[in-house]
Image: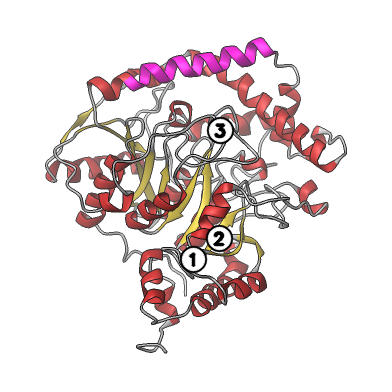
Amino acid sequence: MNEVPVDTSELAWLDATAQADLVRRGVVTPLELLEAAIARIEDLDGEINAVVRGRFEQARREAATVEGGPFRGVPMLLKDFLCHTAGEPVHGGMAVLRDRDWRAAEDSYLAARLRAAGFLFCGRTNVPELALSITTEPLAYGATRNPWDQSRSPGGSSGGSAAAVAAGMVPVAHGNDMAGSIRIPAGACGVVGLKPTRGRTSLGPQYGDHWAQFTHEHVLTRSVRDTAAVLDVTAGAAPGDPHTAPPPRRPYREEVGADPGALRIGFRTTAPSSGEAAHPDCVAAVEHTARLLASLGHQVGPADATALDAPELLESLPPVLAAVVTWELDSWSKRLGEQLPSSVLEPANAMLAEAGRSVTAVQWLAGIAAAQRWAREMAGLWEDELDLLLTPTSPAPPTKLGELAPEAKAPEELAAEVSNRTAFTMPFNITGQPAISLPMHWNAEGVPIGVQLVAAQNREDVLIRVAAQLESAAPWAGYRPPLP
C-alpha cells in the first residue's frame, strides 16, 4: 500500500535513482511508474516525435513480474540503434528495415544487463538513418523536436533519447556515441551524457568492435548520480570482447560527492583542425564553467592542446568512415537475404556507401594506424599537462530543424557540415577516452548549451566527481522545458 498519494506529474521530473527509491519504499509500484511514463509519452510525443515504437503492453506484463536490481521498475527507452532485444524490431532509422519489419534474434549483453538492473523497456527512440547525423530527422520516421524549442533539433544521433529524457517521458534512455552521438544531443537538450572509455561496456554478442572501434554505449540522464549508477550495472567485460577497460577502484556511484581535489583543467574553444572559434554562446558556456571550476579550487586556464589539430586525421579517416557505411549496408543485405543497393539510403549515406566500395585494404589499415598514432599523442596531454580538458560540446547551438535534414543540401555539403559539428566530440571516439557533456548554460533564447569535460583513459571516476561538483554548485534539476 502506498505511503502517500502519488503525484504522477512530479514523477516525470524525478531521476531514476529517486524513482527506484519510491519503489523500494512501497510508495509506488513498478506498474504505476510505467503508467505515468506511458501517459506522458502519449501526451507529448505527438509534438516531440521522440519515440518511434512503443512496447507498452509488453512492459506492463514485465512490470508485474520484475524483481530485484537497483532500478527495479524504472521505465526507460532504448535508442533504435544497437542494444538489440530478442524478437523485437530495431531499424536504425532505415526505411528498408522498417518496411521489412526486421527483428533481432537475441538480446545484446547491454540490454540483458539493463533488464537485470530492473529497468522496464517501454519503447524505442528516433535516430537518424544509420546514426550518421548530428540531427534526428530520418526520412523513415520524421523529425524529432527539441523540447526546449520545437523549431530546433535535439541533436543526433541519440536525439530521440535526449528529447525523451528532457521532456520528462522517462528519467533515463539508452544512447550510443560514434562521433558525439550521446554528448551532442545531451548538450542540445540540457541533460547529462557520458561517453565511457572504450571497452567499458560490451558491444556483444553481435559485435566486438563497431565502426572501427569508435562506438561507445551508455545512457542519457537528468543527473550525474544516475549516469554513475547505470554505469555500475552495465560496465564490465563479456566473453570474447576484444577491448576491456580495467574495473574501477570502487563503484562509480560512490564517486558522486567525492572530493576531486585541486585538478589541472585546461579549456579550449577553437575547433580542432580548423582553428575556427566556436559560436559566442558556446564560448560563453565554457567561460562560465571555467570560472565556476576555478571558484571550486581547481587550477583553470587556457590549453592549446595542439595535438587535437593533427592534419593527417583529416586525410586518413574519411576512407575509414566511408568503408564503415558500405559495411553496414552489406551487413544488412546479408541479414535480409537480398542485396541492398545504395539507393535505399538517404542521399548523403548513399554517397558514402558508394565511396566506401573503392576503399582499399591498405587505405583502411593506414587510417586505423593514423588514428592509433594520434591517440598516443593525445594521451600525452593528460600525462604531462592536464587532468581534464574543457571544451564546448558542439561548436554551435542546436540547429534549426530542416537545415541539416537528409535532403536539405547536396550530400557533400551535408557530410562536411556534420563533420564540422562533431569537431569537439569525434576526437575522443578515436582516442577512446571518457568524455561527458553537462548542461551548464542556457543562451538568451532559452536553449541549452552543453560543455564537454574529457579525462584520461579509464578515468570516468574523475569525470563523475567533477560533474557532481558542478551539479551541486550550479544545479540544473529545476530547469524544465516549456511543456505541460
Membership of 70 in magenta stretch: no
**Mark 2 or 3, closer to the camera:** 2
* 3D distance between C-alphas at marks 3 and 1: 31 Å
Figure quadrant of residue 345: top right
User: Does 160 appear above or below 23?
Assistant: above
Q: Nearer the viewer, residue 468 or 248?
A: 248
Q: Residues within 10 Å of mark 1 (few under 14, many from 20)?
A: many
Q: CA distance from mark 2 to mark 3?
A: 29 Å
Which secondary structure lies at badge 3? helix
Q: Which mark is residue 77?
A: 2
Q: Amino acid at mark 2?
A: Leu
Counting from the top left corner in percent of width and height, residue 379 is at: 34, 22
Residue numbers of the magenta segment = 361-379
Q: Is residue 196 left or right of residue 139?
A: left
- Marked residue nearer the N-terminal end (2 or 3): 2
Q: Which residue is mark 3?
A: 417
Between marks 3 and 1 in the image, the one whose residue lies nearer the viewer: 1
Residue 280 position (above or below residue 448):
above
Distance, label 2 to label 1, CA atoms, is 7 Å
Upstream in the sequence, badge 2 or badge 1? Answer: 2
Q: Secondary structure at mark 1?
A: loop
Q: Are marks 2 and 1 in contact (CB under 8 Å)?
A: yes
Dots 3, 1 in contact, CB < 8 A: no
In this rendering, position of residue 358 left or right of residue 257: right
Q: Which residue is mark 1?
A: 170
Q: Is the residue 217 above or below the residue 87 in the image?
A: above
Few, some or many C-alpha atoms within 10 Å of disc 3 (few <14, some 14-19, many ≥20)?
A: some
